[in-house]
Amino acid sequence: MRHLIMKLAVVAAFLSATTAWATPSRIELKGEIWDDAEGEALIADIKDDQKEIRINASGLEPNSTFSIWLIDETPMLGEVGIGSGDLTFVSDSNGKGTYTALVPARQFKDWDKIEVLHHPNQDTEDMEGAELALRGSLE
Protein backbone atom coordinates (compact mmCIF):
# COMPACT_ATOMS: atom_id res chain seq x y z
CA MET A 1 0.00 0.00 0.00
CA ARG A 2 2.80 2.41 0.90
CA HIS A 3 4.47 1.65 -2.44
CA LEU A 4 1.23 2.44 -4.31
CA ILE A 5 0.84 5.76 -2.47
CA MET A 6 4.43 6.70 -3.36
CA LYS A 7 3.78 5.91 -7.04
CA LEU A 8 0.58 7.97 -7.04
CA ALA A 9 2.43 10.90 -5.44
CA VAL A 10 5.14 10.73 -8.13
CA VAL A 11 2.54 10.58 -10.92
CA ALA A 12 0.62 13.51 -9.39
CA ALA A 13 3.81 15.58 -9.14
CA PHE A 14 4.69 14.74 -12.76
CA LEU A 15 1.23 15.69 -14.02
CA SER A 16 1.32 18.92 -12.05
CA ALA A 17 4.72 19.85 -13.53
CA THR A 18 3.61 18.87 -17.03
CA THR A 19 0.43 20.93 -16.76
CA ALA A 20 2.36 23.98 -15.57
CA TRP A 21 4.83 23.59 -18.44
CA ALA A 22 2.07 23.32 -21.04
CA THR A 23 0.06 26.31 -19.77
CA PRO A 24 0.55 29.16 -22.25
CA SER A 25 1.59 32.65 -21.24
CA ARG A 26 -1.12 35.20 -21.93
CA ILE A 27 -0.23 38.68 -23.15
CA GLU A 28 -2.95 41.28 -23.35
CA LEU A 29 -3.03 43.23 -26.60
CA LYS A 30 -4.45 46.72 -26.25
CA GLY A 31 -6.03 48.68 -29.07
CA GLU A 32 -4.15 51.66 -30.40
CA ILE A 33 -6.24 53.15 -33.25
CA TRP A 34 -9.72 51.77 -32.47
CA ASP A 35 -11.27 52.12 -29.01
CA ASP A 36 -12.87 48.68 -29.00
CA ALA A 37 -9.91 46.78 -30.50
CA GLU A 38 -8.46 44.20 -28.14
CA GLY A 39 -6.82 40.84 -28.19
CA GLU A 40 -4.49 38.37 -26.62
CA ALA A 41 -1.35 36.55 -27.57
CA LEU A 42 -1.01 33.05 -26.12
CA ILE A 43 2.55 31.72 -26.12
CA ALA A 44 3.10 28.05 -25.31
CA ASP A 45 6.19 25.85 -25.24
CA ILE A 46 5.95 23.21 -27.96
CA LYS A 47 9.49 21.84 -27.85
CA ASP A 48 12.68 23.04 -26.21
CA ASP A 49 13.50 25.17 -29.21
CA GLN A 50 10.02 26.23 -30.37
CA LYS A 51 7.02 28.10 -29.07
CA GLU A 52 3.57 28.41 -30.56
CA ILE A 53 2.03 31.85 -30.62
CA ARG A 54 -1.68 32.28 -31.17
CA ILE A 55 -3.23 35.70 -31.53
CA ASN A 56 -6.95 36.27 -31.08
CA ALA A 57 -8.21 39.78 -31.76
CA SER A 58 -11.52 41.60 -32.06
CA GLY A 59 -12.73 45.14 -32.70
CA LEU A 60 -10.50 45.40 -35.77
CA GLU A 61 -11.34 46.97 -39.11
CA PRO A 62 -13.43 44.31 -40.90
CA ASN A 63 -11.97 42.49 -43.91
CA SER A 64 -8.56 44.12 -43.45
CA THR A 65 -4.96 42.93 -43.58
CA PHE A 66 -2.74 42.81 -40.48
CA SER A 67 0.86 41.76 -39.78
CA ILE A 68 2.53 40.60 -36.56
CA TRP A 69 5.87 41.97 -35.28
CA LEU A 70 8.24 41.53 -32.36
CA ILE A 71 9.72 44.87 -31.29
CA ASP A 72 12.94 45.73 -29.44
CA GLU A 73 12.76 49.19 -27.87
CA THR A 74 16.55 49.50 -27.70
CA PRO A 75 17.60 52.07 -30.31
CA MET A 76 18.85 50.60 -33.57
CA LEU A 77 17.93 46.98 -32.80
CA GLY A 78 14.60 47.22 -34.56
CA GLU A 79 11.90 44.71 -35.28
CA VAL A 80 11.37 41.31 -36.82
CA GLY A 81 8.36 39.66 -38.31
CA ILE A 82 7.19 36.88 -36.05
CA GLY A 83 7.77 33.29 -37.07
CA SER A 84 8.56 32.35 -40.61
CA GLY A 85 6.58 32.40 -43.80
CA ASP A 86 3.36 34.37 -43.88
CA LEU A 87 3.14 36.70 -40.88
CA THR A 88 -0.21 38.20 -41.84
CA PHE A 89 -3.89 37.58 -41.26
CA VAL A 90 -7.11 39.08 -42.60
CA SER A 91 -9.90 40.02 -40.21
CA ASP A 92 -13.37 38.68 -40.89
CA SER A 93 -16.52 40.71 -41.60
CA ASN A 94 -17.03 41.17 -37.83
CA GLY A 95 -13.53 42.57 -37.23
CA LYS A 96 -12.19 39.39 -35.63
CA GLY A 97 -8.89 37.81 -36.55
CA THR A 98 -6.66 34.94 -35.51
CA TYR A 99 -3.08 34.04 -36.25
CA THR A 100 -0.98 31.02 -35.27
CA ALA A 101 2.70 30.35 -35.88
CA LEU A 102 5.62 28.33 -34.58
CA VAL A 103 8.44 30.59 -33.47
CA PRO A 104 12.00 29.74 -32.44
CA ALA A 105 12.10 30.14 -28.65
CA ARG A 106 15.32 32.16 -28.87
CA GLN A 107 13.41 34.99 -30.62
CA PHE A 108 11.53 35.87 -27.46
CA LYS A 109 14.55 36.63 -25.28
CA ASP A 110 15.57 39.74 -27.25
CA TRP A 111 12.20 41.43 -27.77
CA ASP A 112 10.13 43.75 -25.58
CA LYS A 113 6.76 44.02 -27.33
CA ILE A 114 4.48 42.35 -29.81
CA GLU A 115 2.62 44.58 -32.25
CA VAL A 116 -0.16 44.02 -34.75
CA LEU A 117 -0.07 46.46 -37.67
CA HIS A 118 -3.04 47.34 -39.85
CA HIS A 119 -2.36 47.74 -43.58
CA PRO A 120 -5.23 49.87 -44.93
CA ASN A 121 -4.04 49.49 -48.52
CA GLN A 122 -3.64 45.67 -48.10
CA ASP A 123 0.10 46.01 -48.96
CA THR A 124 2.09 44.46 -46.09
CA GLU A 125 5.35 45.71 -47.57
CA ASP A 126 4.21 49.33 -47.26
CA MET A 127 5.35 49.92 -43.68
CA GLU A 128 4.97 53.71 -43.92
CA GLY A 129 1.27 53.33 -44.66
CA ALA A 130 0.77 50.85 -41.78
CA GLU A 131 -1.05 51.75 -38.57
CA LEU A 132 -0.44 50.30 -35.11
CA ALA A 133 -3.61 48.38 -34.28
CA LEU A 134 -2.65 46.38 -31.16
CA ARG A 135 0.30 46.29 -28.78
CA GLY A 136 1.33 44.10 -25.85
CA SER A 137 4.35 43.81 -23.59
CA LEU A 138 6.44 40.62 -23.58
CA GLU A 139 8.03 41.52 -20.25
Image (cartoon, rainbow, N blue to C red):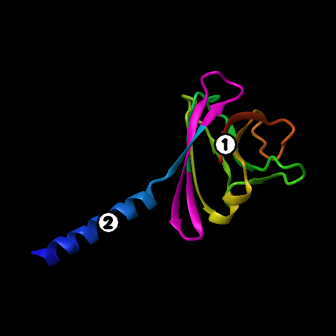
Does the image show residue 85?
Answer: no
Label 2 packing within 10 angstroms: few (<14), some (14-19), many (20+): few
Residue under the point 90% across and 52% down: 76
Residue under the point 84% across and 51% down: 78
Q: Which residue is identified by label 1?
A: 137
Which element is circle 1 on?
A: strand
Label 1 packing within 10 angstroms: few (<14), some (14-19), many (20+): some
Nearer the observer, 1 or 31: 1
Q: Splitting the image into 4 quarters, where does residue 20 fall?
A: bottom left
Give whichever of discs 2 and 1 has the lower sequence position: 2
Dot label at residue 8: none
Q: Which quadrant of the rendered structure holds the N terminus?
A: bottom left
Residue 16 in picture, x, y percent from top left: 34, 61
Which residues lie in the magenta part? 29-53
Residue at the bottom extreme of this rendering: 3
Q: Which residue is identified by label 2?
A: 13
- Amino acid type at circle 1 is Ser
Residue at the right extreme of this rendering: 76
Residue 126 in picture, x, y percent from top left: 84, 42
Looking at the image, residue 100 lies above or below residue 33: below
